[in-house]
Image (cartoon, rainbow, N blue to C red):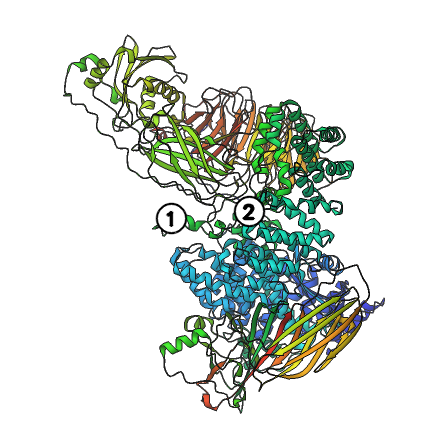
């Protein structure tokens, strides 16, 4: 009866039965219909007959009919209308069960026409007296929202739903919460479900009384709430803790999620937090005695929790012991957690267990167990010996996969404990022949190469491998190449030499794998040019390996913690990687800041999960790959010179040595926002405001009207600004330079600079971890020096510093330390200690930071002193006034750096300035400046009693005068680094600003993390320079266009070229994705814009916009509009919705277009050195921006995120910023003091006030500092005197 | 000459033009398949789940046979959660990042509900009751949100009897039961004799090494209550939990009120010396007021009518292991093996353990087994690759032995990985030392007093995973 018999007339028969008078037959017939429906047969023809059965008082029959209706209404919308009346009637039925059934079903009928008819019944049911109906109606609102959002909005159902949050019945509340949560996630931009204190309170009350599922809904909703302060977080935690004793694991996990999240906000050391941590463990353990599937979910979550806070479960090792009957997925997961919990105290127990597991049958499990033994060795040093002997025992079993796995881990052990266990190499070599997996083979070869000097027959062994070279896996080939070269370097005898020649020949001539070939070339060149260098490079000491495997990246971990219990926590992937749809709100752990500031110390530590301090080392496959990265960087296709290559290579090394991290990087790029708080805070040390001790100048001369007044003429030293004090609290600071390279610092790179901030000398440093393991325990000392600089407080750096993390620290210094003359005078010897070693390096302190603010003297004293100092101490110099500063500018500029102008006079058209400087140690320097009109040099003469510093002062003058930063006070160079890809053609931030893309003339595209100038990946595929690149809004794909006329569509993760479009006739100038990332727009010099559908298989453009009469220079997309600029002096606006083209004739050759963030205006760059801002809607010229150079190149422009400022590069090497409203230049900074090369490309950070620019081969990151005070301009908008080039407004078809 | 009057840049709003990504936070559909992969039940709740999802699961999981090794799989951006009962696959589908723990809890709950309606989950039962299953699915899952799934309540209105001529009053009773604060109990229950039964059922889990070292052990205990009480009784339940006992001795002195147990036969003999035990963790039926437990450590509740599981707990400390298995396996050459197993009972001699079964795994290439045992019956079960030794009962502090000679056919293919010896038993005490101290019943309206209620307490200790490595 269940499955239809498949007769021909079946449908006909059913039809007859459905129309039968007998109720029972009818019902049986409907049942048959449903049965057919279930197995996928189409019974939609029966629609009218089934709907006829709807009018019944038999509840069961009714339900069946409804079930049918839900399934087929969509296919028969016309017929479905027939049911509306019945629904309306049922919603008024006296029986609440029927009312609820009707409201439940009608929401599932997804037919637009019907939905309108449902509003009234739904409204009634939302206010029904019976809670059962209300709770059903609450869900129905969510259903309706899914069909028609507008309707729900218009009908005010959302408000009604919110009212239900205060319903007396907990079940109604729970369903309302569920519905609201879903709706608000669908439309994150509207604050639909705005949780506030009172609401949360209500929910917490309902929590105690509703069903288990309701509790889950409520807890999940509360997890999204951000408590006001730690008190509130604490009280919520208190009220949620009882849920941990609930029998439903989903309730428990959701409660754990809320607690884990809110605990971030509570002082970790407080008794409350400690207590709570203790309470978390037992329920988690209990979850392990549930059904295996739930155990699995629980274990995956425990895995996360243990990474975040290993101490929670540190005493529970035993519960993770694998049971014989556990399903394999539970076993693997338990093993993973066991390794994480292993420490010196429980290692014996764990090892015994692992040994047991290694004899199991499941291959995956056994492998993992073997690998785990190796990890234990690396993690717990005391146990290393035991682990190694266990591994040897396992190798003796000769079980093939066990042996292979063991060899892979032993290689890691060798790296961790060099010169300790090499005695077992012989045993390993016995198994050489049985290795058939690439990783194992590669590991073995690595071992042979690394210890070539100890293995007598190393050459034979390697030769054996070499014979089958071509059939080997790529990984093995690379390893073999390196091993043979190592062997040769260690034993430069005959056989190895022969081998090297052989392998290099094969590699360079017969292989088509670029990695292998390039590496071969490098070795070849190294060996032939400089064997010593070759030795240094190839036999270099390897960086330490980190012992913890696959620790999730902290930011990702934080996000996953916010998803405890959900699929994301099971997959260990952020939701957007497995879920469709884009507008996901990304969850982050709350940032603990803004309150409980009383203990800065514990704050800093608290922000970083404590377990990381003890977690240490290794990635399973790092060891095998590490050799690859000794030498292998992404090589340019055409090697230029050896030294260049080496340089590039050493740059690449640290970041790329960590394949795991690389993956994390890339996967986190897929998210939208990874710079989350809570995990990666980079606190800088607070600056103490003790100003530098300095006594007043010891001038005793009587002031008052005296002769000198006459001599110096009119005093206009206060002409600058009367109210402003003479000195400045902040002097300019040079950009940070690298003090300690990562190579010297064993992975720690320090760059820094000195500055004077708030009258205090500070050292500003960036610490970058380029090693593979976290670095901690930082301390800093300064050697005795000429000026007695010593730190005023200990160095405070957030530790541990994780691989690839950058932390800035500011250290205040004063000059009260003991003094010893250093050479040069301003040299500073610095020692930095960390958990790895102590490092020494030198840094030059720019002398101007020693200039103190109270260095002025009165004119009398000045004159006296000038005369007292012997002529022999006078130093004369010609300063270049390269920026053509006026005398006022000169004075101001110097004043800002604590150079005090005593007086100023004019003698025969020459402006004279008399200035003093006082250093921290009380030395005075007297200076005379003479400028003559029309002359770009300044005559400089200086007198001081300490002639050694004279040259330094000259240098600092040059520095101050050549640097323009001070003029703006607006753009500050944050960082500068070489991109190593030739001239940079374009720089682009990605959607969230955490990454950037650059393209260069060397045909590559690079993906960077601009915060730590870390190259994440290099993409190749263009055969000429890459002119534009754009990343899709979900960060998964890149499109690029270049001189080779190609448009590439590249996968970010793999670097694979997904599509290659080659239909343009000229070089491609600009490329853009649409927001969905489904289309690529490319603009070319051939005068067309081509639109490519990346989802289709066609390689032809889906549309070509060929209206331009000359080359198209740029594209900008805004919603449904495409704006292009062209050298035919027109801006074209294509409206996709209406298929309309609007042309605006500008009258200048146009190079670049940008749309303002409010979508109202567009900004175009022209080849006549002016930027023009137009109203997008009516084409009115709103503003022009001038005073920069753009005559030849395509100079890009940008708008700040609040549309207040406009930025542009300039062909004279400056970055210019205008105020949008006033068109006044607020700032113009030079990239380099002496480099006037054009700045073509720039990109504004999508969130922060930061700019990315490039000049030649360097990337610059600028940040906008304080808002500048713009005097007087704001009031009077300059409207009338502007020359307007009247734009023609031409609509489509006119031309 | 143009003038611009209003400059619209300072106030701007960001346009979110595309809000297409739809979030379906809940279960999108539930499917039930037979072992062949034929779909028996398919109920789709969300628009984003199409018919092809039904096939995707069949092809990628059921027909892939063990290829997918995890209970959650993601196929084409759709996640499938599944579990298997005998030959039946239950699968829930979702496209979004939904609460995975909840989905599995729901699947298990669904199985419970189905079992209580029509017994074992089998293909036949599912087919025969498919209308009922659809009706249940409609009720317990609305738009993918799990709703009240308490069997007792469901049975009150999903009956398969068609529409009952229900009175209005009954209808409201039903709806308030489904949604009410006390969703687990209906009003107006009446018994002539107020009676309640408490079963403390503990399962002892043990993993012991060959050398007799306890690797891990814990007791998973359940307190199952059968209540036949009138009205809306409030109950208070007291146990010898360390924290509670300490609290009590500190605060009050009148705590002499111990177990009110009429047939005093089953006080807990194995733990007479222990007064309090340390409970690692406990969980309660939804009727227990958790907040009260958290604050006062008292267990109070209004029980559902009939049988339910009042609490679950777990202890790991001071467990008295009722039995100990001492294995001795000797491999004599390639074709012969000797196994000797000694079982010792470790509880009061006056008590008797029952249903004792010891399962000794032997290699799959066994061809002959000679068995000798002092007590009970032992059999070689070739199909299970095990020797099963059964004893009906065994007194406390006794010892018994089995020895076996096993002949093997030579086989080099695989090493035998000696699965652990497992054991089943039942003993009449709680190995954790758990004790019911009192259970008081208060019913204010109906006026029957605590002392009139008849209460029964029973302790059963069972084996969970009781394994000794050999």
Distance CA(mark 2)–CA(mark 1) = 26 Å
For the N terminus of chain A, the image quarter is bottom right
Q: How crowded is mark 1: few (under 14 residues within 10 Å), some or many (20 or more)?
A: few
Residue at which label 2 appears:
A617
> Which label was assigned to residue A593?
none
Q: Where is residue B273 in the image (x, y as percent from the top left)?
A: 48, 80
Horizontal and vertical percent position of residue A262: 45, 57
Which of these two is toward me, A5 or A590?
A590
Where does residue B94 sit, x and y in percent of width and height?
Answer: 64, 58
Q: Where is residue A286 in the image (x, y as percent from the top left)?
A: 55, 67
Question: Front-most of A1138 and A539?
Answer: A539
Q: Which of marks 2 and 1 is nearer the N terminus?
A: 1
Secondary structure beneath dot 2 equals loop
Chain of the residue under label 2: A
Subunit ID for the residue under disc 1:
A
- Report the mark closest to the observer, 2 or 1: 2
B255 to the left or right of A861: right
Disc 2 and disc 1 on one polypeptide chain:
yes
Q: Looking at the image, which residue sits at the far top?
A: A908
Q: Label 2: few (<14), some or many (≥20) within 10 Å?
A: many
Q: Which residue is drawn at 63% across and 61% down?
A: A330
Q: In which quarter of the image is residue A710?
A: top left
Q: Badge 1 is on which residue?
A: A601
Q: Is residue A394 above or below residue A30?
A: above
Q: Is residue B313 visible?
A: yes
Does the image show residue B142?
Answer: no
**A1191 above or below A1266?**
above
Q: In which quarter of the image is residue B247?
A: bottom left
Q: How many labels does the image show?
A: 2
């Amino acid at each position: 009866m269940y499955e239809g018999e498949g007769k021909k007339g079946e449908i006909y028969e059913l039809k007859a039965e459905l129309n039968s008078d007998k109720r029972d037959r009818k019902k049986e017939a409907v049942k048959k219909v449903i049965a057919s429906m279930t197995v996928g047969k189409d019974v939609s023809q029966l629609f009218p007959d089934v709907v006829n059965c709807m009018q019944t008082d038999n509840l069961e029959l009714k339900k069946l009919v409804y079930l049918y209706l839900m399934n087929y209404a969509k296919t028969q919308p016309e017929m479905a209308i027939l049911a509306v009346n019945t629904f309306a009637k049922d919603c008024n039925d006296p029986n609440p069960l029927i009312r609820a059934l009707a409201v439940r079903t009608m929401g599932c009928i997804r037919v637009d026409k019907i939905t309108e008819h449902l509003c009234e019944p739904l409204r009634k049911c939302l206010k029904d007296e019976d809670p059962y109906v209300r709770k059903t109606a609450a869900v129905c609102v969510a259903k309706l929202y899914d069909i028609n959002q507008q309707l729900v909005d218009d009908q005010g159902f959302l408000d009604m739903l919110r009212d239900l949050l205060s319903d007396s019945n907990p079940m109604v509340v729970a369903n309302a919460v569920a519905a609201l949560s879903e709706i608000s996630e669908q439309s994150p931009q509207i604050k639909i479900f705005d949780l506030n204190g009172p609401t949360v309170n209500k929910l917490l009350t309902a929590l105690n009384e509703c069903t288990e599922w309701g509790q889950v809904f409520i807890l999940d909703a509360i997890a999204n709430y951000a408590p006001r302060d730690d008190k509130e977080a604490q009280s919520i935690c208190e009220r949620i803790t009882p849920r941990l004793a609930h029998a439903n694991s989903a309730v428990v996990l959701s409660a754990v999620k809320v607690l884990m999240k809110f605990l971030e906000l509570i002082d970790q050391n407080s008794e409350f937090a400690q207590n709570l941590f203790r309470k978390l463990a037992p329920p988690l353990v209990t979850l392990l005695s549930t059904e295996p599937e739930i155990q699995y979910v629980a274990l995956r979550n425990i895995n996360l929790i243990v990474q975040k806070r290993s101490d929670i479960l540190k005493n529970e090792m035993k519960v993770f012991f694998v049971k014989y009957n556990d399903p394999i997925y539970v076993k693997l997961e338990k093993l993973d957690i066991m390794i994480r919990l292993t420490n010196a105290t429980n290692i014996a127990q764990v090892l015994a267990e692992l040994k047991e597991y290694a004899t199991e049958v499941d291959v995956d499990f056994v492998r993992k167990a073997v690998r785990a033994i190796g990890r234990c060795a690396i993690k717990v040093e005391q146990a290393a010996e035991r682990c190694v002997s266990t591994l040897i025992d396992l190798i003796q079993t000769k079980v093939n996969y066990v042996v292979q796995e063991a060899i892979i881990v032993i290689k890691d052990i060798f790296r961790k404990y060099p010169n300790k266990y090499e005695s077992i190499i012989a045993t390993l070599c016995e198994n050489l022949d049985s290795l058939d997996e690439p990783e194992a083979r590669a590991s073995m070869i690595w071992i042979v190469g690394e210890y070539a000097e100890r293995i007598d027959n190393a050459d034979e062994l390697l030769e054996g491998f070499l014979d089958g070279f071509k059939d080997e896996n790529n990984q093995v080939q690379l390893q073999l190449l390196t091993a043979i070269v190592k062997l040769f370097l260690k034993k430069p005898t005959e056989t190895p030499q022969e081998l090297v020649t052989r392998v290099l020949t094969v590699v360079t001539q017969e292989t088509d794998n670029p990695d292998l070939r390039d590496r071969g070339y490098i070795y070849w060149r190294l060996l032939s040019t400089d064997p010593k260098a070759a030795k240094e490079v190839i036999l270099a000491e390897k960086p330490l390996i980190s012992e913890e495997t696959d620790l999730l990246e902290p930011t990702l971990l934080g996000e996953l913690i916010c998803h405890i219990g959900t699929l994301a926590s099971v997959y260990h992937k952020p939701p957007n990687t497995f879920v469709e749809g884009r507008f996901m709100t990304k969850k982050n752990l709350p940032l603990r800041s803004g309150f409980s500031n009383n203990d800065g110390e514990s704050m800093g530590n608290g922000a970083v999960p404590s377990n990381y301090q003890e977690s240490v080392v290794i990635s399973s496959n790092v060891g095998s790959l590490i050799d690859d990265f000794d030498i292998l960087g992404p090589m340019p296709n055409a090697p230029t010179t050896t030294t260049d290559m080496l340089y590039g290579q050493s740059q690449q090394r640290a970041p790329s040595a960590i394949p795991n991290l690389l993956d994390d990087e890339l996967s986190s790029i897929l998210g939208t926002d990874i710079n989350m708080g809570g995990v990666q805070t980079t606190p800088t040390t607070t600056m103490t405001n003790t100003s530098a001790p300095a006594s007043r100048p010891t001038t005793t001369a009587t002031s008052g009207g005296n002769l000198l007044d006459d001599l110096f003429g009119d005093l206009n030293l206060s002409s600058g600004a009367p109210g402003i004090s003479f000195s400045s609290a902040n002097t300019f600071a040079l950009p940070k330079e690298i003090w300690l390279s990562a190579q010297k610092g064993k992975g720690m790179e320090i760059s820094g600079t000195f500055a004077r901030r708030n009258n205090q000398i500070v050292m500003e440093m960036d610490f970058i971890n380029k090693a593979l393991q976290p670095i901690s325990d930082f301390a800093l000392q300064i050697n005795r020096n000429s000026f007695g600089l010593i730190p005023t407080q200990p160095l405070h750096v957030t530790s541990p510093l994780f691989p690839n993390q950058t932390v800035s620290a500011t250290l205040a210094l004063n000059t009260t330390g003991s003094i010893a003359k250093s050479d040069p005078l301003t040299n500073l010897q610095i020692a930095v200690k960390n958990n790895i070693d102590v490092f020494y390096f030198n840094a030059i302190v720019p002398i101007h930071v020693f200039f103190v603010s109270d260095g002025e003297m009165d004119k009398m004293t000045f004159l006296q002193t000038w005369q007292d100092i012997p002529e022999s101490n006078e130093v004369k110099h010609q300063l270049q006034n390269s920026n053509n500063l006026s005398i006022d500018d000169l004075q101001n500029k110097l004043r800002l750096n604590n150079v005090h102008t005593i007086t100023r006079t004019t003698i025969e058209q020459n402006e004279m300035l008399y200035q003093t400087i006082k250093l921290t140690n009380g030395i005075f320097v007297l200076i005379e400046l003479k400028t003559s009109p029309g002359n770009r040099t300044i005559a400089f003469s200086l007198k001081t009693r300490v002639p050694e510093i004279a040259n330094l002062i000259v240098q600092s003058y040059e520095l101050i005068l050549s640097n323009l930063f001070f003029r703006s006070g607006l753009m500050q160079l944050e960082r500068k680094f070489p991109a190593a890809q030739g001239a940079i053609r374009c720089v682009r931030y990605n959607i969230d600003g955490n990454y950037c893309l650059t393209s260069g003339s060397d045909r590559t595209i690079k993906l960077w993390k601009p915060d730590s100038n870390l190259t994440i990946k290099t993409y190749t595929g263009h055969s000429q320079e890459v002119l534009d690149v754009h990343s899709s809004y979900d960060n998964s794909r890149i499109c690029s266009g270049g001189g080779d006329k190609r448009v590439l569509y590249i996968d970010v993760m793999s670097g694979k070229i997904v599509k290659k479009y080659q239909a343009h006739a000229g070089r491609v100038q600009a490329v853009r994705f649409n927001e969905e990332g489904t289309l690529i727009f490319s603009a070319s010099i051939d005068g067309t814009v081509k639109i490519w559908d990346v989802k289709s298989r066609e390689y032809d453009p889906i549309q070509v916009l060929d209206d331009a009469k000359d080359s198209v220079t740029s594209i900008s997309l805004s919603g449904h509009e495409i704006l292009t600029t062209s050298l035919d002096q027109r801006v074209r606006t294509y409206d996709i919705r209406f298929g309309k083209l609007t042309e605006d004739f500008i009258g200048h050759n146009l190079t670049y277009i940008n749309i303002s963030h409010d979508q109202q205006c567009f900004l175009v760059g022209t080849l006549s050195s002016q930027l023009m801002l137009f109203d997008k809607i009516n084409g009115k010229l709103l503003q022009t921006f001038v005073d920069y150079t753009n005559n030849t190149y395509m100079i890009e422009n940008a708008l700040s995120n609040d549309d207040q400022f406009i930025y542009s590069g300039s062909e004279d090497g400056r970055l210019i910023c205008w105020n949008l409203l006033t068109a006044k230049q607020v700032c113009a900074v030079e990239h380099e003091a002496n480099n006037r090369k054009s700045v073509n490309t720039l990109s504004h950070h999508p969130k922060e006030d930061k700019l990315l620019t490039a000049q030649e081969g360097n990337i610059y990151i600028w940040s906008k500092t304080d808002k500048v005070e713009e005097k007087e301009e704001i009031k009077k908008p300059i409207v009338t005197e502007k020359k307007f080039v009247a734009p023609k407004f031409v609509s489509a078809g006119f031309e | 000459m143009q003038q611009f009057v209003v400059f619209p840049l300072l106030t701007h709003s960001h346009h979110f033009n595309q809000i297409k990504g739809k979030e379906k936070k809940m279960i999108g559909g539930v499917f039930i398949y037979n072992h062949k992969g034929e779909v028996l039940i398919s109920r789709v709740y969300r628009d984003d789940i199409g018919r092809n999802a039904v096939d995707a699961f069949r092809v990628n999981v059921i027909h892939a046979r063990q290829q997918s090794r995890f209970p959650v799989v993601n196929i084409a951006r759709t996640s499938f959660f599944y579990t298997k009962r005998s030959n039946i696959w239950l699968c829930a589908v979702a496209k979004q990042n939904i609460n995975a723990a909840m989905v599995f809890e729901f699947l298990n709950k669904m199985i419970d509900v189905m079992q209580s309606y029509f017994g074992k989950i089998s293909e036949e039962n599912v087919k025969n009751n498919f209308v009922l299953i659809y009706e249940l699915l409609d009720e317990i899952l609305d738009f993918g949100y799990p709703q009240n799934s308490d069997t007792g309540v469901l049975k009150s209105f999903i009956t398969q009897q068609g529409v009952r001529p229900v009175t209005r009053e009954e209808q409201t009773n039903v709806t308030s039961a489904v949604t009410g604060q006390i969703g687990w109990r209906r009003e107006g229950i009446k018994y002539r004799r107020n009676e309640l039964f408490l079963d403390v059922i503990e399962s002892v889990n043990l993993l012991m090494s060959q050398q007799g070292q306890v690797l891990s052990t814990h007791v998973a205990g359940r307190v199952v209550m059968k209540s036949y009480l009138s009205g809306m009784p409030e109950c208070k339940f007291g146990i010898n939990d360390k924290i509670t006992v300490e609290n009590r001795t500190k605060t009050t002195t009148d705590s002499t009120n111990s177990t009110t147990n009429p047939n005093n036969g089953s006080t807990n003999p194995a733990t007479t010396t222990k007064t309090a035990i340390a409970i690692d963790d406990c969980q309660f039926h939804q009727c227990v007021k958790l907040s009260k437990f958290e604050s006062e450590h008292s267990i109070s509740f209004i029980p559902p009518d009939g049988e339910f599981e009042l609490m679950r707990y777990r202890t790991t400390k001071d467990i008295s292991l009722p039995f100990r298995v001492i294995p001795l396996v000797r491999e004599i050459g390639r074709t012969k093996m000797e196994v000797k197993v000694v079982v010792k009972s470790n509880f009061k001699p006056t008590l008797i353990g029952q249903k004792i079964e010891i399962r000794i795994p032997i290699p799959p290439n066994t061809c002959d087994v000679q068995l000798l045992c002092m007590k009970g019956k032992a059999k070689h079960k070739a199909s299970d690759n095990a020797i099963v030794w059964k004893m009906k009962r065994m007194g406390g502090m006794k010892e018994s032995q089995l020895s076996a000679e096993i002949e093997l056919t030579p086989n080099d293919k695989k090493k035998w990985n000696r699965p652990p010896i497992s054991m089943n038993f039942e003993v009449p005490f709680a190995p954790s030392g758990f004790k019911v101290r009192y259970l008081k019943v208060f019913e204010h309206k109906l006026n029957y007093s605590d002392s009139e209620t008849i209460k029964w307490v029973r302790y059963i200790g069972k084996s969970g995973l009781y394994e000794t490595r050999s």
